[in-house]
Amino acid sequence: MKKFLVPLFLCIAVIFNVSPIYAQENTSLENTTSAVIEPRADILQWILKTENGKMYKRLWNASKNRWETDWILIAG
């Protein structure tokens, strides 16, 4: 089986003229300095409040300006 595969591979390599491909070197810095950096992850904040002597927390998504959870009792 090996005697058949090696010559077959060599024939295919010669037919398709296999040669290494090199990446083009990027020498221009113009595009990288004008790029704007945007966060990919949401910015989440825990908001705390005390009501009637009980402490609650709620998760706020500052990136999307919306609440992510309901009020959760943490100390009472």
Image: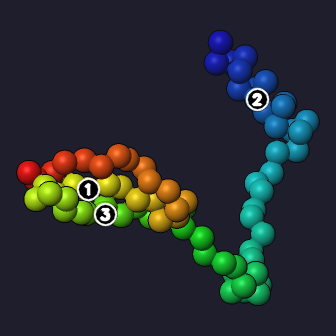
Residue on which disc 1 sits: 57
Label 1: how many residues lie within 10 Å, few (<14), some (14-19) or many (20+)? some
Q: Which residue is mark 2?
A: 9
From this viewpoint, which residue is outermost toward the right?
15
- Mark seen at residue 15: none
State the residue at coordinates (75%, 77%). 26
Up the image or down, 66 lies above or below 11; here it is: below
Task: Residue 47: give its label.
Answer: 3
Q: Earlier in the sequence, mark 3 or mark 2?
A: 2
Contact flag, marks 3 and 2 (Cβ < 8 Å):
no
| Residue occupying image coordinates x 10% and y 59% | 53
In the image, residue 24 sits, relative to residue 21, either above or below, namely below
Say which residue appears at 69% left-offset and 79% top-offset.
35
Question: Residue placed farthest to the front in the image?
Answer: 52
Where in the figure is residue 32, as x and y percent of width and height?
69, 81
Q: Amino acid at mark 1?
A: Lys
Nearest to viewer (mark 3 / mark 2): 3
**Mark closer to the observer (2, 1):** 1
Secondary element at tag 1:
strand
- Looking at the picture, tell me which residue is in the foreground, 72 or 42: 72
Which colour style is shown? rainbow
The amino acid marked with disc number 3 is: Ile
Question: The residue tagged with tag 2: helix, strand or loop?
Answer: helix
Specify the amino acid type for callout 2: Phe
Question: In the image, 11: left or right of 72?
Answer: right
Query: In 3D space, how far apart are the residues under numbered discs 3 and 1 (Cα atoms)?
Result: 5 Å
Instruction: Mark yes or no: residue 41 visible.
Output: no
Q: Nearer the viewer, residue 19 or 27?
A: 27
Task: Tell me if 16 is positioned left or right of 75 in this view.
Answer: right
Please identify the quarter of the rendering in which residue 22 is found: bottom right
